[in-house]
Amino acid sequence: MVHMAKTKDRFPYAEPPEHWKRVKEIKCVKGTRWWIDRGNGGSFRTWLYELLEDEDYKEVLIPLQWVPEVVGVTRAAVHKRAKAGKLTVFSFVMTEPEKEFVNKARMHARSRYDYAVLCECEAWGDLVSAQFDREIERRGGYEAYMREKMRIFDKRRKRGSA
């Protein structure tokens, strides 16, 4: 089960299963909250069941591809936040043996499954929304904000067509 912990900045971060911290195969990318495991189909099922062992937890994980829609940011922003250690991501890389010329077996990554924690995404979405609201207020309301955006857009468009 993943436990939520609030940090000094009061942002809720998910904690992975306790025994994952002791297992050598499951690695946390240095400086991040990105946990990566590798293995075959059987290992993937075990990994997934460990994450979903609590009945309430099934609704907490979402695919990483959905995060931009939930938060309201770009995919690049999601990856930047994850690599900065501000978003917990659980990844599983499905591998299979691959033969080379010299008959040496090497593991080849076949598929990758990435999951993020929904409550972290919702908290981040609230921060983004509050930041947008402050920006609108600072610029004198939504209409003024949109006029400025359209002015900038028109200027860029004219510059590009000239």
Image (cartoon, rainbow, N blue to C red):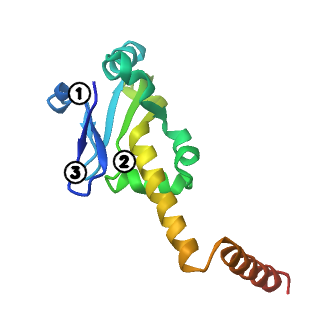
Q: Nearer the viewer, residue 135 or 92?
A: 135
C-alpha separation, residue under disc 1 versus residue under disc 2: 16 Å
Question: Residue 17, which numbered label?
Answer: 1
Q: Position of residue 29 (x, y in %)?
A: 28, 45
- Please, which residue is most extreme toward the left here? 22
C-alpha separation, residue under disc 1 versus residue under disc 3: 18 Å
Would you say the residues marked 1 and 2 are in contact, meaning their CB atoms lie under 8 Å apart?
A: no
Q: Residues within 10 Å of mark 2 (few under 14, many from 20)?
A: many
Q: Nearer the viewer, mark 2 or mark 3?
A: 3
Question: Residue 80, which numbered label?
Answer: none
- Rendered view: 22 above or below 40: below
| Residue located beneath label 3 in the image | 7
Which sits earlier in the primary sequence, circle 1 or circle 2?
1
Q: Residues within 10 Å of mark 3 (few under 14, many from 20)?
A: few
Q: Position of residue 4 (x, y in %)?
A: 27, 37
Q: Secondary structure at mark 2?
A: loop
Query: Label 2 sits on what residue type?
Result: Leu
C-alpha separation, residue under disc 2 versus residue under disc 3: 13 Å
Residue displayed at 51% across by 43% down = 67
Q: Nearer the viewer, residue 132 or 98?
A: 132
Residue displayed at 79% across by 80% down = 154
Query: Label 3 sits on what residue type?
Result: Thr
Q: Position of residue 75 (x, y in %)?
A: 54, 51
Which sits earlier in the primary sequence, circle 1 or circle 3?
3
From the viewer's perspective, tell me whether residue 83 is left or right of residue 136. Answer: left
**Residue 15 placement: quadrant:** top left
| Residue located beneath label 2 in the image | 87
